[in-house]
Amino acid sequence: MQIENCPFCGCSDRRVGIRKMGNKGYRVVCSKCGSTGPHINIADHETKSAAQEVAIEKWNERV
Ligand SMILES: [Zn+2]
C-alpha cells in the first residue's frame, strides 16, 4: 500500500514514512511538519507487516 501525501503540509513519500515505535507498534510520521498518524500496536495484528499496513491505511484516511 502506498502512503499518501501529508494532509497538513502536502509533502510526499520521501519525508512521510512508517516509523517503528519501540518494539510495540508503528505509526506514519511526516518528518517535515511533525504530524503523525495513529499508533498501531503490533500485538493487535498477526504480523508486523499487517500492523504497518493498518498504520498506512489510517494515515491515508485522514483528510
Ligand atoms: Zn507534513
Image (cartoon, grey):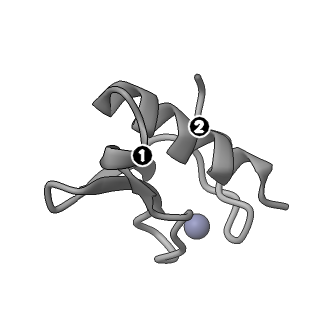
Residue at left offset 85%, top offset 61%:
63
Camera-side mark, 2 or 1:
1
Q: Quadrant of residue 23?
A: bottom left
Tell whether 62 sits left or right of 33. right
Q: Is residue 5 visible?
A: no
Quick check: marks 2 and 1 in contact, CB under 8 Å?
Answer: no
Q: Kindly identify which residue carries mark 2.
A: 3
Circle count: 2
Q: First in sequence: mark 2 or mark 1?
A: 2
* The N terminus lies in quadrant: top right
Question: Under tag 1, what secondary structure?
Answer: helix
User: Is residue 34 in sight in this rendering?
Assistant: yes
- Answer above or below: position of 19 versus 34: above
Look at 30% across and 32% down and name the residue there.
48
* Residue at figure coordinates x 54%, y 74% from the top left: 35
**Residue 21 tag number:** none
Measured as percent of width and height from the top left, residue 8 is found at 71, 71
Q: Quadrant of residue 62?
A: bottom right
Say which residue appears at 52% left-offset and 46% top-offset. 55
Q: Amino acid at mark 1?
A: Asp
The answer for how far apart the CA atoms under marks 2 and 1 are is 21 Å
* Amino acid bearing label 2: Ile
Q: Is 17 positioned to the left or the right of 54 in the image?
A: left
Judged left or right of residue 62, residue 19 is left
Whole-percent x, y for residue 38 in the image: 55, 64
Decide: few, some or many residues near mark 1? Use Cα within 10 Å; few <14, some 14-19, many ≥20.
few
Label 1 belongs to which residue? 44
